[in-house]
Amino acid sequence: MHRIVRTGIFIFVLMLGISCGSSEKKKDAVLAKKKSELKHDQEEVSRLNIEIQKLQDEIAKLDPSSVKAEKPKLVAVAPLAKKTFVHYIDLQGRIDAENISYVAPRGPGGTVKAIYVKKGDFVQKGKLLLVLDNSIIRENIETAKTQLAYAQNIYQRQKNLWDQNIGTEVQLISAKNSVDLAQRQLATMQEQLAFSNVYAEVSGVADEVNVRVGEFFQGVLLNGTPQIKIVNTSSLKAVTNIPENYLSRVHRGTPVLINIPDVNRTFNSTITFVGQSIGLTSRGFTIESKIPNSTGLKPNQVALMKIQDYTSPGAIAIPVSTLQTDEKGKYVLVAATENAKMIARKRPVEIGELYGDEIEIKSGLNEGDVLIMEGFQGLYEGQLITIAK
């Protein structure tokens, strides 16, 4: 009984598979037929369109009045001329001083006994700014002077004996060496005494004076703030950071236009310094450009820098808004006169650099071409146009 049931199920599945396979084949045959019919009809439509156009052309020749005149589209145009195309890297930088001096003692520092400068003072190079505590070194100097006098006295006595053929040469040399040693020690201490006087290394304005009498002066506070900073504003520079992808396009001598918006002043300059390392976090490098001698500018003011990294003399440049794109690439529309009519023509172009609202055209346009500036939206190849007055 079970064997009969299994046999029946097998026959049913087999019949179902044959039925499904037959259905799929019928479906594929119908689809192929439909595609063939569609292709035939499309070819027929294409042939009829050609015939229709041919008949229309023949009728137009025999009866021009029967052809409906095409209304030209109003456009605005401009003839193209060659010019120098310039590309800039626009960055924000800051003003810095060439000569900023962070005053520091020549020795280990010391307690301030006297101050001869206050914030905002103009100081000349070499001016005495501070006097540090030197009482201990002065005492040491007095001791050294006494020791020197004693050594000189011993040497003179030994020399007198030597002149009388008394004593040995070793005793005389030893006494002379003692004098030399005492003199060197005294000279060293006098030099250390000079370290207690702190002088200005450059001329300029005392921009920071963060020290008072009785405090310890070592040049820099624990938080990194300089105790005395002198700024010379007679020689300024603009400083900024450039992304590393411009490394090959920027070098010393590259022209730079520097604008100081706070005072509405602009300077022409060049790059005078290019950093040799890339910042780990900024991924850029530092450049500097000198600013001509000028009053009214201060370090850390905002400086807008236009770095000229590309120049193309005799270039064709067009408004970027006139550039269009189709499946073949970039193109523009120009006005051409043909058979006493003005029509729109498509010109494929190769583009170059973009700056502001202008883009450089490497090829595809020539001087004297008439570019359609306005009204090009919706224009097609060969369409009649008229120029706005």
Image (cartoon, rainbow, N blue to C red):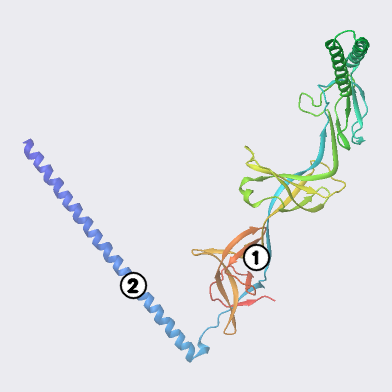
Position above or below: 29 against 156: below
Residue nearer the viewer, 124 or 322: 124
Observer-side mark, 1 or 2, equals 1
**Residue that badge 1 annotates:** 317
Q: Which mark is residue 67?
A: none
Q: Residue 204: percent from the left, percent from the top?
A: 88, 38
Q: Secondary structure at mark 1?
A: strand
Residue in the picture at 88% in, 21% down: 187
- Residue name at image x 85 percent, y 27 percent: 210
Which sits earlier in the primary sequence, circle 1 or circle 2? Answer: 2
At which x and y percent is residue 299?
81, 41
Name the one closer to the observer, 95 or 264. Answer: 95
Whether residue 115 sits left or right of residue 244 in the image: it is: right
Q: Quadrant of the C terminus?
A: bottom right
Image position of 285 (left or right of 59): right
Name the foreground residue: 104 vs 383.
104
Q: Say which quarter of the image contains residue 345.
A: bottom right
- Return the residue nearer the eye: 173 or 106: 173
Residue under pointer 2: 41
Task: Label 2, secondary structure: give it.
Answer: helix
Q: Amino acid at mark 1?
A: Ala
